[in-house]
Image (spheres, rainbow, N blue to C red):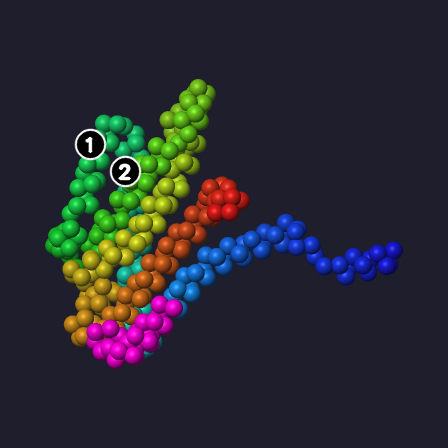
Amino acid sequence: MSGEIAVAASSPVDPATPGAAGGGARLRRIVRATLPPVVFSVLFLTAWELYCRWRDVSESALPPPSSVARALADNRSLLADNAWVTVQEILLGLALAVVVGVGLGALIRSSAVVERALYPWLVVSQLVPIPAIAPVFVIWFGFDMRPKVLVVALVSFFPIVVNTVDGLRAADPELIDLLRTLGATRRRIFRVARLPAALPFVFSGLKVATAFSVIGAVFGEWVGASEGLGYLVLILNNQTDTAGVFAVVTLLAVIGIGMFALVSLAERLLLPWYHAPRREGGA
């Protein structure tokens, strides 16, 4: 018996066990997702740095990545203070866009007449140039945060509305017919059939909206602001501080990527039933 125990203790753990297999598959997915962009970024930044050094490019025209990194470090307090202002505008604008977008999408799908009446105006709302409408918001609401939040919401709500409408249309018609046969109310049909079908679409629209929201915040700050990363771009550009401008742009990109990652994480946590079949299929 003691010999059997010793053999069992010395035997290696079977890598085919579910825990080991799951951990290995998760690690491989992480490596596949992160390695290509990291390698590409390193190669791109190295080529950029070498080009600037070998061609002796003026920093006022194109600063090398090392100068941009130095500007980020030297101005970290200024950048952090202004970044917090811009992040607040983005978060408030996105929250408003989600409320309006999902609510409007549900309203559009509630009636064909409402859809025909409102959908063209949704398209028109995206044809209005943001630099043209942003000064009007400043005139209406002043120079505080409200005009910037409205600009962010205006540029962000359209993909949320469109994806919400498409998601509500994607509900299983057989499930809806079954619920109607069982006497379910419209509210219950919406909660059981339409809303679960629409949620992946809503998150897809929200991912697109996060990218638009950063652009909207910068546009809003260009029109009328005394703080924020968009305002800082104007100041640094007037000072011909190209490295500082690139540092601000880098920080804006980090904010956009970070928010996109947070939305993706929220989607995976809130919709495990949607992502589990894709993981099992190797997606």
Mark 2 and mark 1 in contact? Answer it, CB < 8 Å.
Answer: no
Residue 143 position (above or below residue 103)? below
* Residue under numbered circle 2: 104
The extreme right residue here reads 1
| Quarter-of-image position of residue 116 | top left
- Expressed as whole percent of the image width and height from the top left, the position of residue 81 reads 30, 68
Q: Which one is in front, 153 or 159?
A: 159
- Expressed as whole percent of the image width and height from the top left, the position of residue 22 reads 59, 51
Q: Is residue 193 magenta?
A: no
Question: Which three-letter amino acid code belongs to the residue tagged 2?
Answer: Leu
* Residue under numbered circle 1: 117
Q: Secondary structure at mark 2?
A: helix
| Quarter-of-image position of residue 259 | bottom left
Q: Secondary structure at mark 1?
A: helix
| Quarter-of-image position of residue 76 | bottom left
Visible residue check, residue 87 = yes
Residue 41 position (above or below residue 117)? below
Q: Residue at x 37, y 45 (%)?
A: 203
The extreme front residue here reads 54
Q: Which residues are magenta?
A: 43-69
Residue 19 position (above or below residue 68)? above
Q: Is residue 57 magenta?
A: yes
Question: Which three-letter amino acid code belongs to the residue tagged 1?
Answer: Ala
Magenta span: helix, strand or loop, mainly? Answer: helix
Q: Residue at x 51, y 47 (%)?
A: 282
Q: What is the count of numbered marks?
A: 2
